[in-house]
Amino acid sequence: MQEVSDSRQQASPSFSSVAIIDELKRTFATGRSKSYQWRVEQLTALNQLITENSKDIIAALHSDLGKSDTEAWLTEIAYSTSDIKGNLKRLKSWMKPNKVSTPLMAKPGKSYTISEPFGVALIIGAWNYPFQLVVAPLIAAIAAGNCAVIKPSELSEATSALIAKLVPKYLDNNAFKVVEGGKDETTELLAQAFDKYFYTGGEHVGRIVMTAAAKHLAPVTLELGGKSPCVVDGASNMEIAVKRIVWGKWMNAGQTCVAPDYILIEEEYLADFSQRLIAEIKEQYGNDPKDNKDYGRIINQRHCARLINYLDGEYIIHGGKHNIDHCYIEPTVLVQPSTESAVMQEEIFGPILPIVTCKTKSQMLNFVTSRAKPLAAYVFTSNDKFEAEFVEQVSAGSICINDTNIFLVNHDLPFGGVGTSGIGQYHGKAGFDTFSHKKSVMKRSFKFDAPLRYAPFSKFKLMLLKKFS
């Protein structure tokens, strides 16, 4: 996933991070955020914030990214409200102590774990899904009983301003604060001690966030990105495969952290796949996508220029037209780029899809496994043996078989990266766990006290300890 901040000069922070964090810590110290009732009230209020202001949210997303009403509703609004409903339905059971077994040496007694909130969390959102990628970790933080500082991306200005306006109207003002701004504000926040750090964005800033958390020995979750491969078995259902690939790749103009980053296909199927792919792009977005209300825009001119540079010297079989003034790049397909080229070395995060051919399925697997572990990996196949090999051999944050992106709608599937694609997971119960500390508790009875463990020791005691341990 691309970086949250850019290198533009930012004004000095116009807020006191120390005062904000101190207020939130005082609130947390009262214990009110730990109650089931408070968590339900805040989650309900967050759901109300979304439903009552959905038109304004959609308008802000259109302003920032040119998102269509349907895409904004599906990927940001409905996604968030569905997550809240799932949390409300299961929160009481998640909060219950979890009994575990007690060894013979500690009996009579009982053992269990309690999920307790960390305290005050810092949530740094990203610009590509600027509402949902703030709200989703916030849902988890609330469910787990935390207070939080929310830092939306400054690149999605309209959405950031709307979040800053709405949160104080709906949520507990003493428990949640929104801080707008860019690099300076983020740096100021990272200089403070939080109990939990949650960042969505690129690897470079992710390292900065992790360094800041390490200074306080605080837990950190990094939702990053990488080059998510899409392996296509040419003998599979190609008609449906291309529909799902086009949907997953060009949603949000390709600015999705789990979008297919490149296609791998056997040489003999390249021509058929390419023709079908181009036809499906036209089917979904028309012959001129710049006039299609369902096709979005690049976040800003800087990122648009970055993407255009990827096209230099590449063999383009479809698309390539762009207008940097309007942050527009049409859906673009490349064939056989060099593996050393920028488009194959860096996360694309835009509407450009390279196709690379291999001679065999084994070569495709080797291509994927020899590279950095991605946030998501896709395989389209009707071959059970190849599917099993892919799942077994490919290490990725998530794997989706015969579709793209759709796995995200299942909040029971933990979401997160591995290696350079991220650390930690969230969504549903995984989010509750991410923002919770599992506290271990053992309670002993006074009714029986075995003398075996007490000095003075003897060979007989040792024999009995070995027998019952």
Image (spheres, grey):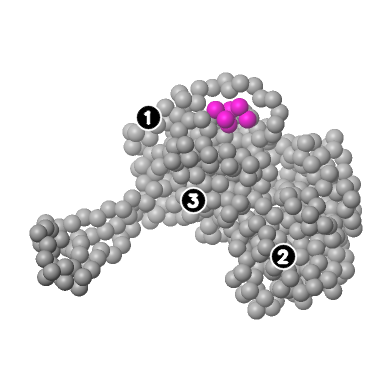
Q: In screen coordinates, is 18 left or right of 8?
A: left
Residue 179 is marked as none
**How many numbered discs sit on the rendered protein?**
3
Q: Residue 118 placed where, x, y %?
A: 40, 42
Residue 367 is marked as 2
Q: Is residue 243 visible?
A: no
SS label for mark 2? helix
Q: Residue 31 placed where, x, y %?
A: 33, 37
**Residue at x-position 69% and y-position 50%:** 256
Q: In screen coordinates, is 149 left or right of 316?
A: left
| Residue 22 is inside the magenta segment | no
| Snapshot quadrant of residue 156 | top right
Comparing marks 2 and 1, which lies closer to the viewer? 2
* Distance in Å between CA atoms under marks 3 and 2: 32 Å
Asked if the residue at tag 1 contacts the one at tag 2, i.e. Cβ–Cβ closer than 8 Å, the answer is no
Q: Residue 264 placed where, x, y %?
A: 76, 65
Q: Residues within 10 Å of mark 1 (few under 14, many from 20)?
A: few
Comparing marks 3 and 2, which lies closer to the viewer? 2
**Residue at x-position 83% and y-position 71%:** 267
Q: Residues within 10 Å of mark 2 (few under 14, many from 20)?
A: some
Region in magenta: 183-188
| Residue 187 is inside the magenta segment | yes
Comes first in the chain, label 3 or label 1 = 1
User: Most extreme residue toward the front, as rendered?
Assistant: 459
| Snapshot quadrant of residue 157 | top right
Residue 26 is marked as 1
